Structure formats: structure tokens, C-alpha cells
Image: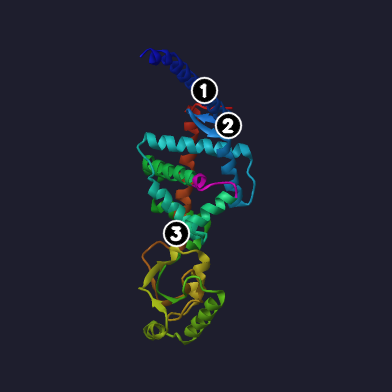
Amino acid sequence: MKAAMMDRPRQFVACRMLVTAAMFVIAATTAAVAQNVVVFVNGEPITAIDVEQRMKFIQLSTQKTPPRQDVIEELINDKLKVREAKRWGIEVPDSEIDSQFTSMAGRLRRTTDQLAQELTKAGASAGTLKAQIRANLAWQQLVRGRYQSSLQLSEKDIQSALEAKKPDDKDDVAFDYVMRPILLLVPPGSPPTVFEGRRKEAEALRGRFRSCEEGIGIARSLRDVAVRDRVIRTSADLPEPLRKVLDSIPIGHLTAPEITRLGVEMFAICAKQESKADSPGKRQARDAIYAERFEQQSTRYLQRLRREALIDRR
């Protein structure tokens, strides 16, 4: 009992030493983090690493090195956008962020892992891009929700824009293209020679294809060919170069073969009919006016948030 009582002071001293050492470590860590902070936005830090990774991402996507101060201002805006959106009950779920990230990777013909690796290799990270996606999506929902009435367009607005920019566009007609996708399958991991062989088969099929009624049957008789259900695309939804390509192909013929991840794909143009949807010119005018109004409202809103924010630059 006496020995145990004599050990207590030693244990107390040892505990004090451990607590003191832990406090020193915490203090040192806090100081290191504080030194790394570039600016606090309403108490939320933006670090030098955040700035560096955003710069690397912009450099990767634009092939230009942005001014560091511009990147800092962009990150400040992102903080304000996310915070204001949360204040109004808008929080973008991680699943939506991941979906956008996957879509971006797909447009670049990458998997999500490949895109993440490229970002890391460039000195950025997937988290950098996802943070930007989150801020943009939250902000779009917020501005559209709060200022919906001022963003609405009338037919008079659109007609005035058409007449001022391109008088012919107001009489432009939209078309629906009825197509059947035809895919000549290629096994994953096949060498380029296999793709080239299938491309030649596709060209041969294209030469024999004279109508959808007859040609679809010919396509189905070939080996490893998938004929998919029909799809309808409106001219207003297509970029001008693609509209020109489709307009140049006679009804009942195939588009030129295109090599894809799954094989060699073509589209049979089965019909082209006038659409009740907006014409390409009208759609472009509508989108341009909406984008302009959205940008004006967004700029005013963000300027007010910056005036009201506590921005502590280090």
C-alpha cells in the first residue's frame, strides 16, 4: 500500500509531462496550419495548398498559368457561394458531385480513376475539381431559385434578339432526326488492327445500306452487330457542325463509321421531319439571353456577399 502511494506522485508527473508534450504538438500543428492559411472567409480558411492545387487545375484545363491573386479571388467566391447556398437550405449531395465528375471524365474519354490520376499527376486533385463543381451547382440552384421571375423570358424578348442579330433566324425551322444506332462490337482490349477490320466491315455495310427497312435487316445478319432502338434528336439540341453532317446524309443512309470504346458505330438516318420545338436560331437566342441575365444577377448577388463578408487576408 505504501509503495503504491509513493508511485502516485511519479505517475502524476508523468501524466503532466505527456499532457504538456501533447499541448506543444497541438500548438505547433496549429501554428503550421495558420502559417499555411492565405485568407479566412467568414472564419473558413483557404490555404496555400488550396491555391496551388486550383492553379494547377486551371493550368491543366486551359493550358495557361492564371495569376495567383485571381485564383485566390475565385476560391473566396466559391466559399461565399457554398455558404450562402447552405443558408438557404441548398446542399448538393455527394452523389450529384460524383455524377458530374463522371460525366466530365466521359467527355474527355477517361474513366473517373484515369481523370483523378491525371489531376494528381498535374499537381491538383480530384477534390479540387469536385469542390469547384459543388460551388457551381449550389450557386446555380440558388440564383435560379431566388431570382426565377427576373430570369424568365418572353417570346417578345427572343424575337427582338433574333431580329437584331440574324433576321433570317426568326423563320428558321427545327427538324427531328429519327435514327437507329448500329454498333459493330469489338471485344475489350482488342488491338487497333481489329478495330480497323471492323471499320472496313462498317464501310462495306454503308455501301449496301439504301433504306432503314432493308438495311437494318442486312446489319442484323452480320456477326457481332447490335442494332439499337431508334433515337430522336432535335436540330436545336445539336451543334451546327453535326447538323450539317446529318443534313448532308440522304434519308435511309448511314453516317460515317466512328470508332468508340465498344467498337465501330454508325447511325442510320431513317427520317427527318419538321419539329414543333425551337429552331436552332431561336434556341441559341433563348440560351444567350438567359445566360446574360443569369450572369448579371449572379454578379450583383456575389458582389453584395463580398461586401458583407469578413475576408481576412494573411
Q: Label 3 is placed on what type of residue?
A: Lys
In the image, which is nearer the foreground, mark 1 or mark 3? 1
Vertical placement of residue 135 versus 176, above or below: above
Crowdedness near tag 1: few (<14), some (14–19) or many (≥20) residues, C-alpha within 10 Å: few
Q: Nearer the viewer, residue 268 or 4?
A: 4
Q: Which residue is mark 1?
A: 21
Kindly tell me whether residue 121 is visible in this rendering: yes
Q: Are marks 2 and 3 in contact (CB under 8 Å)?
A: no
Residue 121 located left or right of residue 170 = right
Vertical placement of residue 6 versus 105, above or below: above
Spatial CA span between label 2 and label 3: 50 Å
In the image, which is nearer the foreground, mark 1 or mark 2? 1
Q: Are marks 1 and 2 in contact (CB under 8 Å)?
A: no
Pick whichever of labels 2 and 3 is earlier in the sequence.
Answer: 2
Q: Label 2 is placed on what type of residue?
A: Asn
Q: Which residues are magenta?
A: 122-129
Residue 150 located left or right of residue 43 = left
Q: Label 1 is placed on what type of residue?
A: Ala
- Residue at the (59%, 41%) spot, across then down: 52
**Residue 2 among those drawn in magenta:** no
Pick whichever of labels 1 and 2 is earlier in the sequence.
Answer: 1
Kindly tell me whether residue 152 is visible in this rendering: no
Q: Which residue is mark 3?
A: 282
The tag on residue 179 is none
| Local SS, label 2 | helix
From the top left corner, tell me how far across and down residue 123 is, in percent: 59, 47
Spatial CA span between label 1 and label 2: 23 Å
Q: Are marks 1 and 3 in contact (CB under 8 Å)?
A: no
Pick whichever of labels 1 and 3 is earlier in the sequence.
Answer: 1
Which quarter of the image is occupied by the N terminus?
top left
Residue 181 occupies which quadrant of the picture?
bottom left
Q: Which residue is mark 2?
A: 36
